[in-house]
Image (cartoon, rainbow, N blue to C red):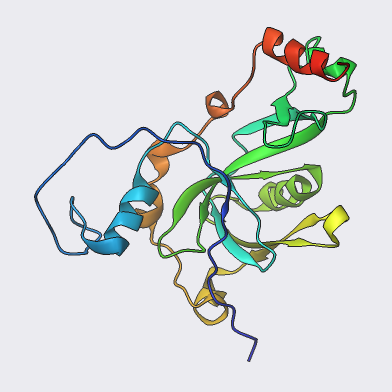
């Protein structure tokens, strides 16, 4: 019998502040997914996971295998990213390349290709809508899969591998039939997945700075 893997809850790599909840209610309901008002910590987690947000949350690939599910057959955004290591620690260090005469090309001539997918993080108590961002190597693996079979609705195991100075993302498909034994979880129902159809992020959710803002970052590299 294969070794059992337990669900793990990877931390978010990036999570922007969301607007505070301005609604209040004195109603209470049982801790049940079918009710409008949920009770307890489990209810809170379900509410948070299902809350629409215009702010993209990035999935942090864990050191031990984490389980994710793709919500669409392809990426929702592909772009070039400048890594600005001259920016002081604690401040933003990555910026989307404008590609058309981008000011950052002068100080970082080789921006990296980045790709984003809408996924569900299945490492917690409830599925959480988040973004899986990866590079060309991982995207090529997913592209080959998508050329023969739909990517939407498929499960994948992901983890960070390699030494600290050369970390890489490893990814492999997981069959739905193996989830109960290998991951101690059940495959999501069609209804559970469809709840996220109206909150999927698209290319408009990607933060792109103005030319003047990027020029200021570029100028800081020579100061």
Residue at image location 62% in from the left, 67% down from the top: 174
Residue at image location 40% in from the left, 45% down from the top: 196
Relative height, residue 207 to residue 173 (above, below): above
| Quadrant in the picture for the N terminus | bottom right
Horizontal side of 139 relative to 166 (left or right) equals: left
Residue at image location 59% in from the left, 25% down from the top: 207
Horizontal side of 180 relative to 14 (left or right) equals: left
In the image, 146 versus 178, the foreground residue is: 178
Relative height, residue 184 to residue 32 (above, below): below
In the image, 149 versus 167, the foreground residue is: 167
Relative height, residue 192 to residue 65 (above, below): above
Give the quadrant of residue 68: bottom right
- State the image coordinates of residue 40 (x, y, percent, origin top left): 24, 63
In the rendered image, the residue lying farthest to the bottom is 1
- State the image coordinates of residue 223 (x, y, percent, origin top left): 86, 16
- State the image coordinates of residue 167 (x, y, percent, origin top left): 81, 55
Residue at image location 16% in from the left, 41% down from the top: 24
- State the image coordinates of residue 217 (x, y, percent, origin top left): 75, 18
In the image, 186 versus 169, the foreground residue is: 169
How many dots with numbers? 0
């Amino acid at each position: 019998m294969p070794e059992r893997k337990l669900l793990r809850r990877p931390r978010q790599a990036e999570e922007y502040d969301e607007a505070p909840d301005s609604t209040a209610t004195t109603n209470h309901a049982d801790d049940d997914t079918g009710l409008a008002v949920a009770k307890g910590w489990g209810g809170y987690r379900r509410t948070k996971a299902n809350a629409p947000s215009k702010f993209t949350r990035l999935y942090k690939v864990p050191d031990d295998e984490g389980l994710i599910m793709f919500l669409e057959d392809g990426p929702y955004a592909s772009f070039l990213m400048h890594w600005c290591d001259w920016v002081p620690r604690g401040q933003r260090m990555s910026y989307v390349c404008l590609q058309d005469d981008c000011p950052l090309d002068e100080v970082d001539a080789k921006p990296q290709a980045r790709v984003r997918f809408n996924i569900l993080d299945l490492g917690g108590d409830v599925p959480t809508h988040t973004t899986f961002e990866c590079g060309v190597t991982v995207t090529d693996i997913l592209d080959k899969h998508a050329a023969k079979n739909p990517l939407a609705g498929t499960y994948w195991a992901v983890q960070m591998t390699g030494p600290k100075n050369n970390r890489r993302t490893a990814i492999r498909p997981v069959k739905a039939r193996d989830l109960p034994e290998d991951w101690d979880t059940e495959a999501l129902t069609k209804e559970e997945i469809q709840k996220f159809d109206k909150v999927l992020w698209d290319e408009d959710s990607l933060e792109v700075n103005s030319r003047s803002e990027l020029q200021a970052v570029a100028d800081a590299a020579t100061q």
